[in-house]
Structure formats: structure tokens, C-alpha cells
Image (spheres, rainbow, N blue to C red):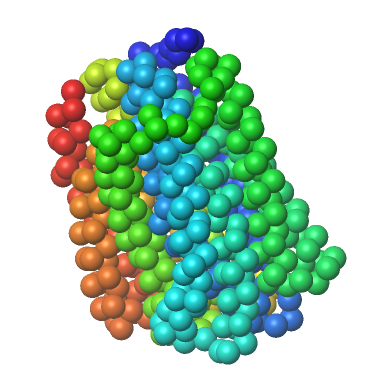
Amino acid sequence: MTVLRYPANITKAYLIKLSLPIFLSNLAIPMVGIIDTALMGHLTNEDFLVATSLGSSIILMIFWSFGFLRMGTVGMVSQNLGRGDYREIVYIVLRNLLIALCISIILLMLFFPIIYIIGFFFQISDDVKILVEQYILIRLFSSPAELTLYVLIGFFLGLQLTNISSIIAILFSILNILLSIILVTKYNLNILGVAYGTLISAYIVSIFFLVITFFYIKKRFKITPRFNLSIFTKKKVLRLLTINFDIFLRTVCLTFAFLWINFLSSKINQEFIAVNTILLHLLTIAAFFLDAYAYSTEGVIGYTVGKKSEKSFLLTVSNSIQLSFITGLIIGVFYIFFSKDIINLITNLDIMRYHTYEYLFWLVLLPPIASICYQLDGIFIGATETKSMRNSTVVSVALYLLISTIFVDLFGNHGIWMSVVCLMFFRSITLYLQFGNIIRKF
């Protein structure tokens, strides 16, 4: 069996080396949403843009709710890597692949309840509702492939092979963009084109990398992945389900918090759904850059916890938070100069441009503030301190929902973004207060 070795001295340079491939992949991921929005934003009918904005936000909430398939995989794989238990690493991957398949079947069965909830909560026209239904149905059929990619990316992040995890995300994004452009511009499929583009690219990339992962495990660990009863050891399964459920609740709360933006936007005016979606796309770009440090740190943190190396752990925490905050400042400065240019590329509708320009200040302020809680998330995920993450998020989102309703009444759409700033601050404080729970693992 091959013994895997990693450096004991976790320097800023090492974290940057791990993060660089993720920077590239994380830039590609939000580009899919931006291109889809741009394709719809250049059509003559505003309904396509509103429907894509709302439909993609809802699907994002649903799929991100199962982010534990990536996050739980990273933490558990990296800790078992630190312990040298390679067979358990393989079992973790197989368990989560089975869970991904079961979740996908359930999601398809929940199509009609999802559509009912959309109609109940969102004040949209009948034409927009029909478009949203078509988009969501297609995207739900892509769930087996997309959730499989979550597991595979988590596996390679846990092994600190960020170059491979990044290639998965980049290929998926590029293929998605190309297919969406072709289906929309050449075949005039409109919103169906961007949905089918995602579905087809997800299956192509997931099948390809399942094969790659199978042969990688055989070569590196000298283990042939196969489903057997050993996968279902009661203690291991219960631990996996506990970790996954904690992360699930945490992610549901966070994704709901961002979907709440669309709900509040629809209460102001339907066009603000599109305006704030454009702003969220730009914030997502910042988030994915900041998450590059969080993602690379997850695997390193898990490895140091598995090795019981407190010195390496604390060094990783310090260096990663510093790098993340500096990057947040750089992104804020970038948006001062270039945010209008990006918005102009996304849409040529003058009314959308005009309204979006009014809120660019928040894009400058949010990245450095959010950088702290994003990085703490990565640290807690790597340490599989999921109960603390769950509690932190529940408290933070509850406070956010309370103040957002007050701020929107007082300040309109600016109140929504003031609330988002508060959400990031609440998350940072509540996670910091529970940091001692990780230290007690050493």
C-alpha cells in the first residue's frame, strides 16, 4: 500500500500552491450562472431573465443543501488520510455516492411540491411560472450527475489533490457554457437551452471522472473499489449520517438565507429579483475566490487533526485567515473599478443596468467582511466539527431573517444588502466563540 506524505510546516506558500487551481475552477463555476443570465438578459422578453434568475436560485438552494456530499467527504477523507486508513477512505466515497443517488431519486419525486412552494411564496406572472417549471424539471434530472461531482470533488480535496478537483469543476463549467450558448443561440431553446446545457455536461463529466477515480484508487491505494457489506458498518454509517445531517441543516439555512433575498426582492418589485441576482452573481465570484483558501484548507486541517498535530493546525488557521482577508480586500478594490463593466456584459437592458449600479457599494464592502466566516467554515469542515457549524448557522440566519424584514421596511433594497453584511458578521462571531471545540480534539 502506498504511503502518502505531506509537509508538516504549513506555510502561506503551500496554501497558495494548493489554492491556485481552485482559484481557476472557482472562477469558472460562477461564470456558468453569469453566462446563462447574460444569454437570457440579451433576449427581448424580460420574462426569460426573471425565470432563469429565480429558477437557478431555487436549484442552487436545493443542490447546495446537499453540499455535505462534498464537505463531509473532504473532512472524513482527510482525517483518515492523516491516520493512514486508506480502506476507510474508499468506503467513505462509496457511501456518499449511494447517498447521492438516493437523494436524486427523492428530488425527482418532489417536483410538484417544489413547484407549489414557488407559486405560494413568489409573486410572479403565469408566463414566468411556466418557464421556471420547465427549467427546474430539467435540472432535477441532472441531480444524480451533479451530486456525484460533489462527492468526487470532495474526495480529491480531502487528498489535497486540488489540481484534480479543479479540473473536474473547470471541465464541467466550460462544457456547460459551450452547450448553453449553442442551444440558446443556434437552436433558440431559450431557458430550456441553459437547463439542457447543464444536464448534458453534468452526465458527461461525472461518468468520465467516476472512471478516472476508480483507476486512481486502484493504483494509489492498491484497493479495488466495490460495494460490499463492509461499507455499512453501523458505527461508521451513523457517524457519516450525523456529520452529513449537521452540514445539511447548516447548508439549508445558508441557502435559504440567500433565497430569502429573492423573496424580499419580489416584495419590493419583480424586477429587483433580476437586479439582485446580478449582484449575487458578482458576490458569488468573490465568494468562490475566497472559498479557494477554505477548500484547500479543509483537506490540510483534516490531515492535521488526523495526525494530532496541533502546531500544524494552528499554523494553518493563522496563515489561511490572513490570506483570505487580504484576498477579500483585493476583490473589493477590483469591484470599485470594474463592476459596472461586468454588469454591462451581463445585460443590455438599460433599466436593469441603472438599478444595479445603485447597489455596487455593497460589492466592495462584502468580500473582506465575508472572508473571515468563509475561512472559519473551511476550518470547521476539515475538523468535522459539524455540530458547532450547525449551531452557528442557525443562530446567525435567525438573526439575519429578523433584521432583514426591519431593514427592508426602512431602507428598501439597500436594507437587503445591509442584512447580508450582518449575516456574514454573525457567522464569524458565532464560529469564533466555538473554536475551542476543535482544540479539544488534540
Q: Give the residue displayed 73% in from the left and 76% down from the top.
A: 43
Q: Nearer the viewer, residue 167 or 315?
A: 167
Above-or-below relation of 340 to 320: below
Measuring from the top left, give residue 285's x and y in whole percent. 53, 52
Q: Give the residue displayed 50% in from the left and 56% down from the top.
A: 104
Above-or-below relation of 232 to 43: above
Q: Give the residue displayed 55% in from the left and 56% down from the top.
A: 143
Q: Residue furthest front?
A: 229
Number of marks present in the image shown? 0
Tell me the quarter of the picture where residue 47 sits.
Answer: bottom right
Residue 183 seen in this snapshot? yes
Q: Nearer the viewer, residue 71 or 413?
A: 71
The quarter of the rendered structure image containing the C terminus is: top left
Q: Give the residue displayed 28% in from the left and 24% down from the top.
A: 305
Q: Nearer the viewer, residue 421 or 250?
A: 250
Above-or-below relation of 343 to 26: below
Above-or-below relation of 1 to 358: above
Asked whether, in this view, residue 101 is left or right of residue 8, the answer is: right
Measuring from the top left, give residue 427's x and y in whole percent. 26, 53
Measuring from the top left, give residue 24's x and y in whole percent. 59, 39
Measuring from the top left, give residue 274's x and y in whole percent. 55, 74
Residue 380 seen in this snapshot? no
Q: Which residue lies furthest to the bottom in this view?
A: 126
Tell me the quarter of the picture where residue 133 sits.
Answer: bottom right
Tell me the quarter of the picture where residue 42 sits.
Answer: bottom right
